[in-house]
Amino acid sequence: MTILVSAASGQLGRLIVDSLLARGVSASDIVAGVRTPAKATDLAERGVRVVAFDYDAPATLEAGLVGIDRLVLVSGSEVGKRTEQHKAVIDAAAAAGVTGIAYTSVYGATESTLPLAPEHVATEQALAASGVPFVLLRNNWYIENYAGDVARAAETGVIAAAVGDGRVAGASRLDYAEAAAAAILDDARLGQVLELAGDESFGYAELAAAAAEVTGREVVYQPLSEDDLRTGLTAAGLDEGTIGFVAALDAGIAAGALDSSDRTLSGLIGRPTTSLVAALRPLV
């Protein structure tokens, strides 16, 4: 079985390739699809075939998927363009006769109030319409997303957000990468919707405490109102679209969009998910 991992030169994609190799998949059976092949020479040196695979260039998608059995479609990073990009990949996969797709969606996509959700829902709908068997990997928050918050906390001693008492069941990128590898290798997972979350949810006071532990200084959580948040982001020079996105994200977290006690992720990867402190420590 030949597996193509898209966005394989990115932070998650590389870890998925690593996880496939760790599960005993031969490097010759893994294809790394990347926008710029020169950025994946390290994968080629490990025996992984590297192909151009640009979500905005359909010809590369068609060529890259020739002879591919399974596809791990890592969601793109260009918010606002992802529906069209993902549909191009799905269409190419269907035309190439791919027999299974694993897609990295967002936690609770169809009910989520997060501003990230609509593009993921549209992609899930495109998968359903494609006729290609698929498994949805609805990932909760990546703890590594807090790298900027921890860096600022190391300087200011403060993590400020308008999330109230909202909790986040985050996990590390490696946890989600291992889940993607496990799912794409298991025929029984096709047709499933996997809601993937960390074993232990945390509030932002706990995030501040974890940041204090890894930075070695006192860090406190400063709750903000939405107006305060918008004022601060405006002062930082962010544009109105970005400010609205961040405000909506915080509002979704405050409303519980990322809270969970689900243990599907740890069950899938066969170990507890990475703790908050353990995931934050390499970011310092």
Image (cartoon, rainbow, N blue to C red):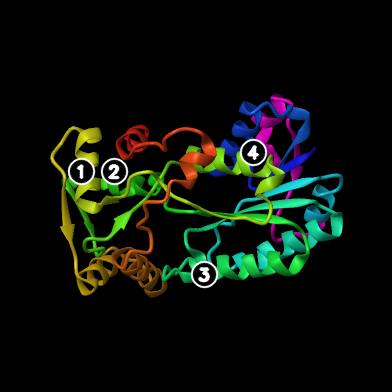
Counting residues from the start of the chain, the first of labels 1 and 4 encountered is 4
Counting residues from the start of the chain, the first of labels 2 and 3 encountered is 3
Q: Quadrant of residue 39?
A: top right
State the extent of the magenta-drawn residues as a range.
Answer: 37-59
Residue 253's place in the image compared with 226, above or below, is above
Counting residues from the start of the chain, the first of labels 4 and 3 encountered is 4
Tell me if mark 1 has few (under 14), some (14-19) or many (20+) residues whose alpha carbon lies within 10 angstroms of its own. Answer: few
Question: Given this view, does label 1 or label 3 mark the residue nearer the observer?
Answer: 3
* Residue at image mark 4: 39
Q: Quadrant of residue 166?
A: bottom left
* Residue at image mark 3: 110
Give the residue drawn at x 65%, y 33%: 20
* Residue at image mark 2: 151
The answer to which of 149 and 207 lies nearer the viewer is: 207
C-beta proximity under 8 Å, tags 1 and 3: no
Which quarter of the figure is the N terminus placed in?
A: top right
The answer to which of 56 and 180 lies nearer the viewer is: 180
Amino acid type at circle 2 is Ala
Question: Given this view, does label 4 or label 3 mark the residue nearer the observer?
Answer: 3
Give the alpha-carbon distance from disc 1 to disc 4, as whole Å. Answer: 32 Å
C-beta proximity under 8 Å, tags 2 and 3: no
